[in-house]
Image (cartoon, rainbow, N blue to C red):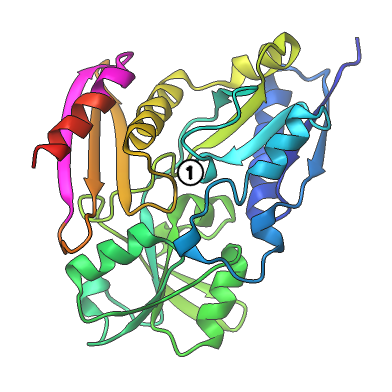
Amino acid sequence: MNQKIVLGTRGSELARAQARLVEKAIQTVRPELRIETKIVATKGDKMKAVDLRAGRKGLFTAEIERALLAGGVDVAVHSAKDLPSETNPGATIAAVLPRASADDVLVSKHSGDLAGLPDGATVATGSVRRKHQLLWKRADLKIVDLRGNVLTRLRKLAANEWDAIVLARAGLDRLGRSPALNEINFEDSQFFLEVLPREIFLPAGGQGIIALQICVGDESAKAIVDPVNDRETLLCLRAEREFLRLLHGDCNSPVGVLAKIDDGRMKLHAQVFDQGLAAPLEGKVEGERADSERLAAQLLRQINEM
Protein backbone atom coordinates (compact mmCIF):
# COMPACT_ATOMS: atom_id res chain seq x y z
CA MET A 1 0.00 0.00 0.00
CA ASN A 2 1.36 3.40 -1.04
CA GLN A 3 0.70 5.14 2.28
CA LYS A 4 1.26 8.88 2.77
CA ILE A 5 2.07 10.83 5.93
CA VAL A 6 2.06 14.60 6.39
CA LEU A 7 4.59 16.30 8.67
CA GLY A 8 3.73 19.71 10.11
CA THR A 9 6.44 22.24 10.96
CA ARG A 10 7.33 25.93 11.10
CA GLY A 11 8.68 27.67 8.03
CA SER A 12 12.12 28.78 9.25
CA GLU A 13 15.21 27.34 7.61
CA LEU A 14 16.06 25.48 10.83
CA ALA A 15 12.54 24.05 11.19
CA ARG A 16 12.66 22.84 7.58
CA ALA A 17 16.09 21.30 8.18
CA GLN A 18 14.71 19.47 11.22
CA ALA A 19 11.72 18.22 9.22
CA ARG A 20 14.15 16.90 6.60
CA LEU A 21 16.00 14.99 9.32
CA VAL A 22 12.70 13.44 10.41
CA GLU A 23 11.78 12.60 6.82
CA LYS A 24 15.17 10.96 6.24
CA ALA A 25 14.89 8.92 9.45
CA ILE A 26 11.40 7.67 8.57
CA GLN A 27 12.30 7.02 4.93
CA THR A 28 15.24 4.86 6.04
CA VAL A 29 12.92 2.41 7.81
CA ARG A 30 9.85 2.93 5.59
CA PRO A 31 11.19 3.58 2.04
CA GLU A 32 7.79 2.91 0.49
CA LEU A 33 6.12 5.70 2.46
CA ARG A 34 5.25 8.98 0.75
CA ILE A 35 6.13 11.90 3.04
CA GLU A 36 4.82 15.43 2.60
CA THR A 37 5.80 18.45 4.72
CA LYS A 38 3.23 21.13 5.45
CA ILE A 39 4.40 24.54 6.68
CA VAL A 40 2.30 26.00 9.49
CA ALA A 41 2.73 29.67 10.44
CA THR A 42 2.80 30.10 14.22
CA LYS A 43 1.93 33.10 16.35
CA GLY A 44 5.60 33.55 17.24
CA ASP A 45 6.52 33.67 13.55
CA LYS A 46 3.88 36.32 12.81
CA MET A 47 4.61 38.63 15.74
CA LYS A 48 6.96 41.54 15.07
CA ALA A 49 7.90 41.65 18.74
CA VAL A 50 7.57 39.25 21.66
CA ASP A 51 6.95 40.56 25.16
CA LEU A 52 8.94 38.04 27.19
CA ARG A 53 7.22 39.22 30.37
CA ALA A 54 4.02 37.71 28.99
CA GLY A 55 5.70 34.35 28.52
CA ARG A 56 6.31 32.25 25.42
CA LYS A 57 4.14 29.21 26.13
CA GLY A 58 3.11 27.71 22.81
CA LEU A 59 4.17 30.73 20.72
CA PHE A 60 6.00 28.49 18.25
CA THR A 61 4.02 25.27 18.68
CA ALA A 62 0.29 25.89 19.34
CA GLU A 63 -0.80 26.31 15.71
CA ILE A 64 1.09 23.19 14.65
CA GLU A 65 -0.54 21.27 17.49
CA ARG A 66 -3.97 22.57 16.41
CA ALA A 67 -3.30 21.47 12.81
CA LEU A 68 -2.44 18.02 14.17
CA LEU A 69 -5.61 17.76 16.24
CA ALA A 70 -7.71 18.99 13.30
CA GLY A 71 -6.27 16.32 11.03
CA GLY A 72 -4.36 18.70 8.77
CA VAL A 73 -1.08 16.95 9.57
CA ASP A 74 -0.28 13.47 10.86
CA VAL A 75 2.91 14.25 12.79
CA ALA A 76 3.87 17.60 14.32
CA VAL A 77 7.62 18.25 14.26
CA HIS A 78 8.80 20.54 17.08
CA SER A 79 11.96 21.80 18.68
CA ALA A 80 11.26 20.15 22.03
CA LYS A 81 12.40 23.18 24.04
CA ASP A 82 9.59 25.25 22.45
CA LEU A 83 6.86 22.93 23.73
CA PRO A 84 5.07 24.01 26.93
CA SER A 85 5.56 21.56 29.79
CA GLU A 86 1.85 20.74 29.56
CA THR A 87 0.41 20.22 26.08
CA ASN A 88 -3.09 19.40 24.80
CA PRO A 89 -4.29 16.09 26.30
CA GLY A 90 -5.32 14.99 22.82
CA ALA A 91 -1.73 14.97 21.62
CA THR A 92 1.36 13.14 22.80
CA ILE A 93 5.11 13.17 22.15
CA ALA A 94 5.38 9.70 20.65
CA ALA A 95 8.99 9.80 19.49
CA VAL A 96 12.18 11.87 19.41
CA LEU A 97 15.29 11.74 17.25
CA PRO A 98 18.65 11.22 19.00
CA ARG A 99 19.61 14.38 20.87
CA ALA A 100 22.05 16.74 19.20
CA SER A 101 24.35 18.85 21.36
CA ALA A 102 22.47 20.59 24.17
CA ASP A 103 25.13 23.29 24.56
CA ASP A 104 24.86 27.04 24.05
CA VAL A 105 27.33 28.93 21.85
CA LEU A 106 28.67 32.47 22.12
CA VAL A 107 28.80 33.99 18.63
CA SER A 108 31.10 36.99 18.94
CA LYS A 109 32.81 39.72 16.94
CA HIS A 110 35.83 39.23 19.22
CA SER A 111 38.20 36.29 19.34
CA GLY A 112 38.40 34.63 22.72
CA ASP A 113 35.80 33.43 25.20
CA LEU A 114 33.10 35.06 27.33
CA ALA A 115 35.68 36.35 29.80
CA GLY A 116 37.47 38.05 26.94
CA LEU A 117 34.57 40.29 25.93
CA PRO A 118 35.25 44.00 26.59
CA ASP A 119 33.99 45.56 29.84
CA GLY A 120 30.36 46.57 29.40
CA ALA A 121 30.02 44.55 26.21
CA THR A 122 26.56 44.22 24.66
CA VAL A 123 25.26 40.66 24.28
CA ALA A 124 21.90 39.90 22.65
CA THR A 125 19.65 37.00 23.59
CA GLY A 126 15.94 36.26 23.55
CA SER A 127 16.23 33.82 26.46
CA VAL A 128 15.59 34.86 30.06
CA ARG A 129 17.63 31.83 31.19
CA ARG A 130 20.65 32.90 29.16
CA LYS A 131 20.30 36.48 30.39
CA HIS A 132 20.53 35.31 34.01
CA GLN A 133 23.44 32.98 33.25
CA LEU A 134 25.37 35.73 31.46
CA LEU A 135 24.88 38.25 34.26
CA TRP A 136 25.75 35.62 36.87
CA LYS A 137 29.26 35.41 35.45
CA ARG A 138 29.60 38.87 33.86
CA ALA A 139 27.50 41.42 35.80
CA ASP A 140 29.00 44.23 33.69
CA LEU A 141 27.40 43.04 30.46
CA LYS A 142 24.59 44.94 28.79
CA ILE A 143 21.91 42.46 27.69
CA VAL A 144 19.56 43.36 24.84
CA ASP A 145 16.61 41.42 23.44
CA LEU A 146 16.97 39.29 20.34
CA ARG A 147 14.40 37.35 18.34
CA GLY A 148 14.04 35.81 14.90
CA ASN A 149 15.35 32.63 13.33
CA VAL A 150 19.03 31.70 13.43
CA LEU A 151 19.98 33.46 10.20
CA THR A 152 18.05 36.59 11.17
CA ARG A 153 19.89 36.67 14.49
CA LEU A 154 23.26 36.40 12.76
CA ARG A 155 22.29 39.25 10.44
CA LYS A 156 21.24 41.37 13.42
CA LEU A 157 24.62 40.76 15.06
CA ALA A 158 26.32 41.98 11.87
CA ALA A 159 24.08 45.03 11.53
CA ASN A 160 24.11 46.26 15.14
CA GLU A 161 26.79 47.59 17.47
CA TRP A 162 26.54 44.44 19.55
CA ASP A 163 29.54 42.42 20.65
CA ALA A 164 27.97 38.96 20.69
CA ILE A 165 24.83 36.84 20.70
CA VAL A 166 24.09 33.43 22.25
CA LEU A 167 22.58 30.60 20.18
CA ALA A 168 21.91 26.89 20.62
CA ARG A 169 24.68 24.74 19.17
CA ALA A 170 22.18 22.25 17.75
CA GLY A 171 20.67 24.89 15.47
CA LEU A 172 24.05 25.98 14.16
CA ASP A 173 25.07 22.36 13.56
CA ARG A 174 21.85 21.56 11.70
CA LEU A 175 22.37 24.58 9.47
CA GLY A 176 25.93 23.54 8.66
CA ARG A 177 27.64 26.19 10.79
CA SER A 178 29.34 23.99 13.35
CA PRO A 179 31.06 25.62 16.35
CA ALA A 180 33.75 22.96 15.92
CA LEU A 181 35.17 25.34 13.30
CA ASN A 182 35.77 28.02 16.01
CA GLU A 183 34.79 30.75 13.56
CA ILE A 184 32.37 31.21 10.67
CA ASN A 185 32.10 33.48 7.69
CA PHE A 186 28.50 34.59 7.39
CA GLU A 187 27.61 36.69 4.38
CA ASP A 188 30.07 39.62 4.69
CA SER A 189 30.95 39.07 8.37
CA GLN A 190 33.31 36.90 10.36
CA PHE A 191 32.22 35.66 13.77
CA PHE A 192 34.09 33.71 16.45
CA LEU A 193 32.39 30.80 18.19
CA GLU A 194 32.80 29.48 21.73
CA VAL A 195 30.87 26.54 23.16
CA LEU A 196 29.83 27.83 26.57
CA PRO A 197 30.56 25.66 29.64
CA ARG A 198 27.56 23.54 30.52
CA GLU A 199 28.15 23.81 34.27
CA ILE A 200 27.28 27.52 33.94
CA PHE A 201 25.05 27.55 30.86
CA LEU A 202 22.84 24.60 31.72
CA PRO A 203 20.46 24.30 28.74
CA ALA A 204 16.72 24.71 28.51
CA GLY A 205 14.66 21.57 28.98
CA GLY A 206 14.50 19.73 25.67
CA GLN A 207 17.30 21.71 24.01
CA GLY A 208 18.80 19.83 21.07
CA ILE A 209 15.85 17.44 20.76
CA ILE A 210 13.44 17.14 17.82
CA ALA A 211 10.07 15.94 19.13
CA LEU A 212 7.44 14.11 17.07
CA GLN A 213 3.90 14.72 18.34
CA ILE A 214 0.90 12.66 17.22
CA CYS A 215 -2.76 12.43 18.20
CA VAL A 216 -3.51 10.17 21.14
CA GLY A 217 -4.88 6.90 19.77
CA ASP A 218 -3.49 7.32 16.25
CA GLU A 219 -1.97 3.85 15.96
CA SER A 220 -1.04 4.34 12.30
CA ALA A 221 1.12 7.40 13.04
CA LYS A 222 2.55 5.68 16.12
CA ALA A 223 3.63 2.69 14.03
CA ILE A 224 5.43 5.04 11.63
CA VAL A 225 7.34 7.12 14.20
CA ASP A 226 8.08 4.39 16.74
CA PRO A 227 10.96 2.81 14.73
CA VAL A 228 12.83 6.15 14.62
CA ASN A 229 12.34 6.89 18.32
CA ASP A 230 15.49 7.18 20.43
CA ARG A 231 14.22 5.76 23.70
CA GLU A 232 16.98 7.10 25.97
CA THR A 233 16.52 10.62 24.59
CA LEU A 234 12.76 10.35 25.15
CA LEU A 235 13.33 9.25 28.77
CA CYS A 236 15.59 12.27 29.30
CA LEU A 237 13.04 14.61 27.72
CA ARG A 238 10.29 13.25 29.97
CA ALA A 239 12.42 13.88 33.06
CA GLU A 240 13.22 17.45 32.00
CA ARG A 241 9.61 18.23 31.08
CA GLU A 242 8.31 16.73 34.33
CA PHE A 243 10.68 18.93 36.34
CA LEU A 244 9.44 22.00 34.44
CA ARG A 245 5.81 20.92 34.91
CA LEU A 246 6.27 20.53 38.66
CA LEU A 247 8.03 23.88 38.78
CA HIS A 248 5.29 25.42 36.63
CA GLY A 249 8.05 26.54 34.28
CA ASP A 250 8.22 26.83 30.52
CA CYS A 251 10.80 27.87 27.96
CA ASN A 252 10.56 31.47 29.21
CA SER A 253 11.43 30.63 32.80
CA PRO A 254 14.99 31.30 34.06
CA VAL A 255 15.57 27.56 34.47
CA GLY A 256 18.15 25.18 33.07
CA VAL A 257 17.58 21.44 33.32
CA LEU A 258 19.40 18.52 31.72
CA ALA A 259 19.02 14.75 32.01
CA LYS A 260 21.72 12.28 30.94
CA ILE A 261 21.82 8.49 31.02
CA ASP A 262 25.09 6.74 31.83
CA ASP A 263 25.36 2.97 32.34
CA GLY A 264 21.59 2.66 32.63
CA ARG A 265 21.26 5.35 35.29
CA MET A 266 19.78 8.81 34.85
CA LYS A 267 21.46 11.96 36.15
CA LEU A 268 19.25 15.03 36.39
CA HIS A 269 20.71 18.50 36.99
CA ALA A 270 18.82 21.80 37.30
CA GLN A 271 19.47 25.50 37.88
CA VAL A 272 16.69 27.82 39.02
CA PHE A 273 17.34 31.55 39.08
CA ASP A 274 15.31 33.08 41.89
CA GLN A 275 14.42 36.77 41.94
CA GLY A 276 17.02 38.85 43.70
CA LEU A 277 19.71 36.15 43.60
CA ALA A 278 22.61 36.47 41.17
CA ALA A 279 23.64 32.81 41.48
CA PRO A 280 21.12 30.04 40.77
CA LEU A 281 19.75 27.45 43.14
CA GLU A 282 21.20 24.16 41.87
CA GLY A 283 20.48 20.51 42.44
CA LYS A 284 21.54 17.10 41.12
CA VAL A 285 19.90 13.70 41.55
CA GLU A 286 20.58 10.24 40.17
CA GLY A 287 18.51 7.08 39.87
CA GLU A 288 17.04 4.41 37.60
CA ARG A 289 16.61 5.71 34.07
CA ALA A 290 12.92 4.81 33.85
CA ASP A 291 12.12 6.62 37.10
CA SER A 292 11.91 10.12 35.60
CA GLU A 293 8.85 11.35 37.52
CA ARG A 294 10.28 10.41 40.92
CA LEU A 295 13.68 11.92 40.05
CA ALA A 296 12.09 15.18 38.87
CA ALA A 297 10.10 15.46 42.11
CA GLN A 298 13.19 14.62 44.19
CA LEU A 299 15.21 17.29 42.37
CA LEU A 300 12.56 19.95 42.95
CA ARG A 301 12.40 19.10 46.67
CA GLN A 302 16.17 19.39 46.87
CA ILE A 303 16.13 22.86 45.30
CA ASN A 304 13.17 24.04 47.37
CA GLU A 305 15.04 23.10 50.57
CA MET A 306 17.96 25.39 49.76
In the rendered image, the quadrant that contains the C terminus is top left
Q: Is residue 19 visible?
A: yes
Describe residue 127's horizontal placement relative to residue 151 as left or right: left
Q: Which residue is mark 1?
A: 81
Q: Quadrant of residue 43?
A: bottom right
User: Quick one: quadrant of the N terminus?
Assistant: top right
Percent of width and height locating residue 200? 22, 55
Magenta span of residues: 280-295
Question: Looking at the rendering, which quadrant does residue 107 occupy?
Answer: bottom left
Count of numbered circles in the view? 1
Q: Residue at x 50, y 71 (%)?
A: 146
Q: Residue furthest bottom?
A: 161
Q: Amino acid at mark 1?
A: Lys
The image shows residue 127, relative to residue 99, as above or below, that is below
Magenta segment includes 292: yes
Q: Residues within 10 Å of mark 1 (few under 14, many from 20)?
A: many
Residue sitting at x 15%, y 38% = 304
Q: Secondary structure at mark 1?
A: helix
In this rendering, does residue 20 appear at all? no
What is the quadrant of residue 116 in the picture?
A: bottom left
- Residue 61 % position (x, y): 63, 44
Residue at the farthest front position: 54
Q: Position of residue 175 (x, y in %)?
A: 59, 55
What is the x, y in percent for residue 162? 43, 85
As drawn, the residue found furthest toward the right would be 2
Name the one closer to the observer, 282 or 1: 282
